[in-house]
Image (tube, rainbow, N blue to C red):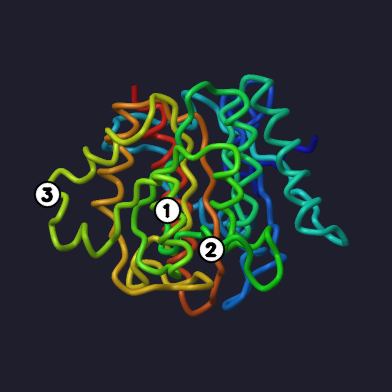
Amino acid sequence: MKELGIKQNFLAIDKKYSNYKDSEIVVISAPLEKTVSYGKGTAKGPQEILDASHYVEFFDEEVNRELCFDKGICTLAPLDFKKISVQKGIQKIYNEVGRHIDAGKFVVTLGGEHSLSVAPIKAHHERFENLSILQIDAHSDLRESYEGSIHSHASVMARVAEFNKNIVQVGIRAQCKDEADFRKNNQIKTFYMREIKLGMYGDNWQELVSKSLTENVYITFDVDGFDPSLLAATGTPEPGGLFWDETMNLLKIIGLDKNIVGFDIVELAPSKYHQSSSFITAKLVYKMLNYAFVN
């Protein structure tokens, strides 16, 4: 287990606050990319997030703390997925995440394509009672299979639903009919983006999302959940998405109301034409950590 030093780790923090023994938080880089179907480049996402994080401020004025020094954040060397199948890659992530949860760590997984998320979700599901999953995403990802693979990024939540149907989706604005039927038949709660924008959930839609979740919550955040005008560097951008403040309000409310036990952030496909996307994703990681430890 190799710990990354100040020049490579999340936020560029020194060893006193980034060694494994003393850190409550562990960041795992999982550059898995095996089934992308449109834009490519998610394998470069974790490294770009780490690089961009060096320009994120330690102090969060909203919660009035420097979380990285209060809790410690250890960044581990990236996992290697060369010459292995997507299924074996998912198993590798599952084993790694489980090991660190068992060591008492709060685990953040950076992707990579969304197919990998089934691994950390399952690892947390097996260790936290009554777990619900908040999926922030443009797509339902509920297809039984896609392009011949049941482990596709477009099928990840169908795989999750095989062991946990307590899924709450936010930001969805692209799905096929089979996914819509699957969602209805399995009673998956979906806050469609257009319905949010039309005010069909009222001004307190974030509160309604939080009330739909159980006490223990795992968050899987596909960055294409954001509107492309905010974050363009993703493989399958969809218009009409979430914006920053409304998303942060949602995450903060959940942090205050529930127990966030872990999260992953996936589908950043870095681009030299949209460098701000990498910084926004890095800031998102730190904001989510601050909200997870807000109490």
Disc 1 marks which amino acid? Arg
Disc 2 marks which amino acid? Leu
Pair 2/1: label in front? 1
Per the image, the residue denoted by label 3 is: 202
* Residue 183, numbered label: 1
* Residue 6, numbered label: none
- Residue 249 vertical position relative to residue 14 in the rendered view, above or below: below
- Dot 2 or dot 3: first in sequence order is 3
Whole-angstrom CA distance, mark 2 to mark 3, is 31 Å
Disc 3 marks which amino acid? Gly
Q: Nearer the viewer, residue 61 or 180?
A: 180
- For label 2, the SS is loop
**At x 11% / y 49%, what residue is drawn?**
202
**At x 34% / y 58%, what residue is drawn?**
171
- Residue 287 in the image: x percent, y percent? 39, 42
Specify whether 209 is left or right of 266: left
